[in-house]
Image (cartoon, helix red, strand yellow):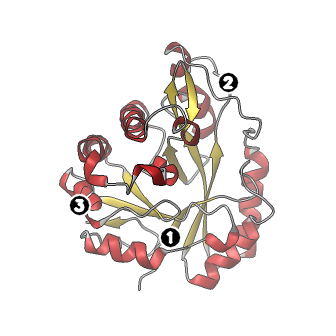
């Protein structure tokens, strides 16, 4: 099996990790499992609007989570350089996972600008509910599960169309992680129109779709929708918040991606392409 790069990893520099996550431990794990490159895409989230952030113009109240802390970019980039020196046989990429970049465009842009990062992910962890941004787990307590997914996809479409800060769309159907068992099995087909609208907009912007192995894996059929809508590139991401999860389930993900017609790119560090 050709092992792809892991383009979505968190370390001690992300606010939601524990002592089970470290840059050095993740690098050691990558070498152990044959992952040729690792991108440390640390969380870039905000709890207040900055000047020029579109979310404020929409009249939304941002999330106020005590766990969310600013990324110390200078120290983080210094740690990246230390790991590059320590692990010369591993390609190590700097990066961030920008949460709701279409709403925090100015705040996120001030950090992402100046080409400081090799890999930038875009993600949606919260949706507007009753005038404020609500984290996806909490929304299932306020709305029916189908309504949660439809609101999510509608906001995700706004994210793709409203932000040019990111290169890869992370965990396309993030709410699936919290889908209640009482609602029965999750069926991608029930939301095909919503998936396709997001995939079409992403393809038109010539960006990559992530196959996230922490989330329930995308099906071959879903990746077929990506091809149908013009998608050309797939990125693999473990979304690891513990060192041992780097490259996790990549064997299964590779089978799914290959079955959908995507193959390794120009080199082992590249996205997979159709």
In this rendering, position of residue 253 left or right of residue 116? left
Which image quadrant for residue 246? Answer: bottom right
The residue beneath circle 2 is 48
The answer to whether residue 170 is visible is: no
Which residue appears at 50% of the width and 74% of the height? 249
- Against 173, residue 265 (above or below) is below
Q: Nearer the viewer, mark 1 or mark 2?
A: 2
The residue beneath circle 1 is 5
Earlier along the polypeptide chain: callout 1 or callout 2? 1
Identify which residue, 71 or 78, lies in the foreground.
71
Which image quadrant for residue 20? Answer: bottom right
Q: Which of marks 3 and 1 is in front?
A: 3
- Cα–Cα gap, marks 2 and 3: 38 Å
Pinpoint residue 175: horizontal percent, then vertical percent.
47, 47
Which image quadrant for residue 35? Answer: bottom right
SS class, disc 1 = loop
Pinpoint residue 83: horizontal percent, then vertical percent.
73, 68
The quarter of the image holding the C terminus is bottom left
Residue 224 numbered mark, or none:
3
The answer to whether residue 120 is visible is: yes
- The answer to whether the residue labelled 2 contacts the one labelled 3, judged by CB atoms less than 8 Å apart, is no
Which residue appears at 48% of the width and 39% of the height? 165
């Amino acid at each position: 099996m050709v092992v792809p790069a892991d383009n979505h990893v968190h370390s001690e520099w992300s606010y939601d990790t524990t002592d089970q996550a470290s840059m050095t431990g993740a690098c050691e794990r990558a070498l152990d499992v044959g992952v040729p490159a690792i991108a440390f895409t640390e969380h870039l989230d905000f709890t207040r609007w900055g000047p020029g952030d579109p979310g404020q113009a929409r009249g939304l109240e941002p999330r106020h989570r005590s766990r969310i802390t600013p990324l110390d970019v200078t120290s983080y980039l210094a740690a990246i350089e230390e790991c590059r020196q320590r692990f010369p046989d591993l390609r190590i990429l700097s990066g961030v996972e920008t949460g709701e970049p279409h709403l925090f465009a100015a705040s996120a842009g001030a950090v992402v600008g100046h080409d400081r990062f090799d890999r930038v992910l875009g993600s949606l962890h919260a949706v507007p509910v009753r005038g404020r941004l609500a984290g996806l787990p909490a929304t299932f307590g306020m709305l029916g599960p189908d309504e949660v997914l439809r609101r999510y996809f509608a906001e995700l479409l706004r994210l793709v169309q409203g932000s040019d800060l990111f290169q890869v769309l992370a965990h396309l159907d993030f709410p699936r992680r919290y889908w209640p068992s009482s609602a029965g099995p999750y069926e991608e087909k029930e939301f095909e129109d919503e998936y396709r609208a997001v995939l079409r907009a992403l393809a038109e912007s010539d960006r990559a779709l992530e196959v996230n192995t922490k989330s329930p894996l995308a099906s071959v059929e879903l990746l077929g929708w990506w091809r149908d809508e013009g998608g050309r590139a797939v990125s693999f991401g473990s979304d690891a918040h513990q060192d041992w999860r780097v490259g996790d389930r990549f064997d299964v993900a590779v089978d799914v991606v290959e079955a959908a017609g995507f193959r390794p790119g120009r080199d082992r560090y590249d996205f997979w392409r159709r």
